[in-house]
Image (cartoon, grey):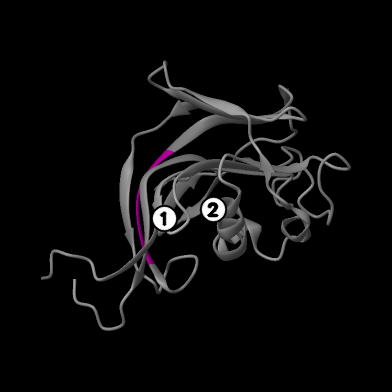
Amino acid sequence: MAVIQQGAVSWSGENPGIYLKDPARLDGGWTALALYFRIVASAHGRGRGMLVLGEPEARAAFPEVPNVCLTDNVPLMRYLLAEFVPAFGAFRNLPAIGAIEPMQAAGGATNASEHDAWSETLEAPQVRLGMHWRGLGAPFAADVGPDLSATGRHRMYSVFQGAGEASITIDDKPLAGVPIERDFLGGKLSSAFLAFAESWIEETAGASR
């Protein structure tokens, strides 16, 4: 078995998410969605970015509606919004994606001081975004081939950790909704999750593993 994975590394880093639903309509669509990226290697360099969709079905962006993206590397975030985010299951065919233009972030912070909690913030002069996870479960590793990965052409490695509680905030005000347990890679995972050591490799055809 080959030790070196063949194929170009599209990006590597972290990619936690929070997907919320109305607790009175758990069989309905997502009421709010958020993704955070901390990229350590890519063709577009390193950087952080946070995408928050408070009205996923609206083809409009901040300040008209709470759909906003902040980043410290705009070309990198544009690449992720064009090539990866629309392929992720909860984000497929969402009108909001087409309206988003990344805004330059002025700063941000990570708070992981509690063993069962995590938070990320990014801010600009116009707006402050936050993602907050509590009640973290046991981490598990995944090796997802192109036949199951979101893009259909990458092998994805990651370590996931679900959260029992989570919130998405804009200017420190939480968006409505709660995370749910959902089907995930043949098992179950909260729709609020951390994703560490994540790498997307454009696997070479016929590569052995």
Instruction: Tell me which amino acid carries mark 1.
Output: Ser
Q: Secondary structure at mark 1?
A: strand
Task: Locate residue 145 relative to residue 91 in the image: left or right.
Answer: left
Q: Secondary structure at mark 2?
A: helix
Task: Locate residue 48 relative to residue 155 in the image: left or right.
Answer: right
Residue that carries the numbered disc 1 in the rendered image: 42
In the rendering, at what x and y percent does residue 34 appear? Answer: 63, 42
How many dots with numbers?
2
In the rendering, at what x and y percent does residue 69 appear? Answer: 68, 43
Q: Nearer the viewer, residue 4 or 183?
A: 4
Query: Which residues fall within the magenta stretch?
Result: 155-161
Instruction: Tell me which amino acid carries mark 2.
Output: Leu
* Residue at 40%, 59% in the rendered image: 186
Task: Locate residue 28 relative to residue 205 in the image: left or right.
Answer: right
Q: State how far apart marks 1 and 2 are (Cα).
A: 8 Å
Asked if the residue under mark 2 is in contact with the one under mark 1, i.e. CB atoms within 8 Å, the reply is: yes
Residue that carries the numbered disc 2 in the rendered image: 76
In the rendering, at what x and y percent does residue 162 appear? Answer: 45, 38
Task: Locate residue 148 relative to residue 121 in the image: left or right.
Answer: left
**Badge 1: how crowded within 10 Å, few (<14), some, or many (20+)?**
some
* Residue at 57%, 42% in the rendered image: 49
